[in-house]
Image (tube, helix red, strand yellow):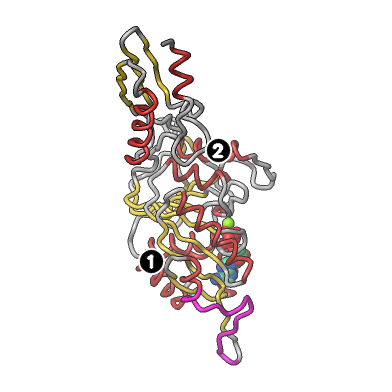
Amino acid sequence: MTKEDVIELLSKVKYPGYARNIVDFKIIKSIDVNDEEVKIVLNLATKNEDIKRMILDNIKNIFKGSGIRLILSTVQDEPKSTTVEQKHFVKTAKKRIAVLSAKGGVGKSTFTISLAVFLKRKGYTVGVFDADIHGPNIPRMLGTLDEKASINENKKIVPVLKDGIYSMSLGYIVDQETPVIWKGAMVSKAIVEMLESTEWPDMDYLIVDLPPGTGDAALTVKQNMDVDSAVIVTTPNELAIADALRTIDFFKQVEINISGFVENMAYFVCDNCHNKLYPFGNVEPEELEKAFGIPCLGAIPFDPTIEEATDNGTLMTLGNEEYFNLINEVVSKI
Ligand SMILES: Nc1ncnc2c1ncn2[C@@H]1O[C@H](COP(=O)(O)OP(=O)(O)O)[C@@H](O)[C@H]1O
Ligand SMILES: [Mg+2]
């Protein structure tokens, strides 16, 4: 019997559940033939013991009566890893929270800053990392638009410190007025470079403002730091909800732990009648919880003083107790 004869015989054995045979399936690792015996080594990656047994039995059957001794063995080669090495930047933070949304304009950056301000007022040390390199809004909202990144003696970027909140943004490196068009790979590269070259102080919390959607940025952040939890920001209109669903699926897939969602601009309290109005639609949080499969962390109203404070970078000094009580509620659930 020659090696070709053996291959011929093996090609009569189908891979269980498939029309293709085990030779085509490339599970034959080696074949050694001499006058008395044939040695076949299979590379069986399947963890299904039934399939393994079926394949081995079928091979034994076709060699029955051939008068040759069959020595059959299996190995399991390590599957070639396609996953990128996990890195652990910003270890100086005790907790890393990512804020994300399906689309822009739902208040993701506003929520990021609100969280930072709230935690800072509580006495925690807080940093904000602006990973939204398409629209780095953090400097405007923190009132640090004129700041530029400075380099320390270790040749690392020092985060900007304003009102007790540390922050790092592409806005501190490039000219804010010049729009930059980023391709996917460049987005990742820019984020990794910012993470690599920033020297963060010891912090209780680092909050990451991610760009909207399910793209390279989110994956890059996940691959480069241990994200303890993620918060999804959505508005209550139907389109935003449909998009949020996709985003949540994506994050589950890439195994980022999602704490829940925040419904932003959920309602508006009328100045005159003091009733809650629902300009974007009124969806019950329970309904959303069911659709998303994650808990609702809170509903935040549309509040013109918030809009003004974020646009002017003065949220840190804003009194608005009611608003920060709502943020407190959210924080307690993260
Ligand atoms: N709860 C809110 N009440 C009033 N205005 C808000 C609220 N949340 C966000 N905004 C305003 O909506 C706009 C978009 O918010 P932003 O945080 O920039 O969204 P994103 O980061 O998701 O693109 C900003 O002008 C912001 O001031
Ligand atoms: Mg934003």
| Percent position of residue 174, x then y | 61, 41
Q: Quadrant of the C terminus?
A: bottom left
Query: Residue 221 location in percent, x, y?
Result: 47, 44
> Judging from the image, what secondary structure is the residue with disc 2 in?
helix
Q: Residues within 10 Å of mark 2 (few under 14, many from 20)?
A: some
Q: Is residue 246 above or below residue 130?
A: below
At a point 33% along the width and 46% down the height, the residue shown is 202
- Name, please, the residue furthest toward the bottom: 273
Residue 56 belongs to the span the image colors magenta: no
> Residue shown at 54%/60% (left/top)?
108
The residue tagged 1 is 331
Residues in magenta, as a range:
273-287
Residue lying at 38% horizontally and 62% vertically, measured from the top left: 119
Of the numbered discs 1 and 2, the one sitting upstream in the chain is 2
In the image as oriented, which residue stretches furthest toward the top? 35
Query: Which SS type dominates the magenta stretch?
Result: loop
Q: Which residue is mark 2?
A: 190
Element class at badge 1 = helix
| Horizontal and vertical percent position of residue 179 | 69, 45
Circle 2: residue type: Ala
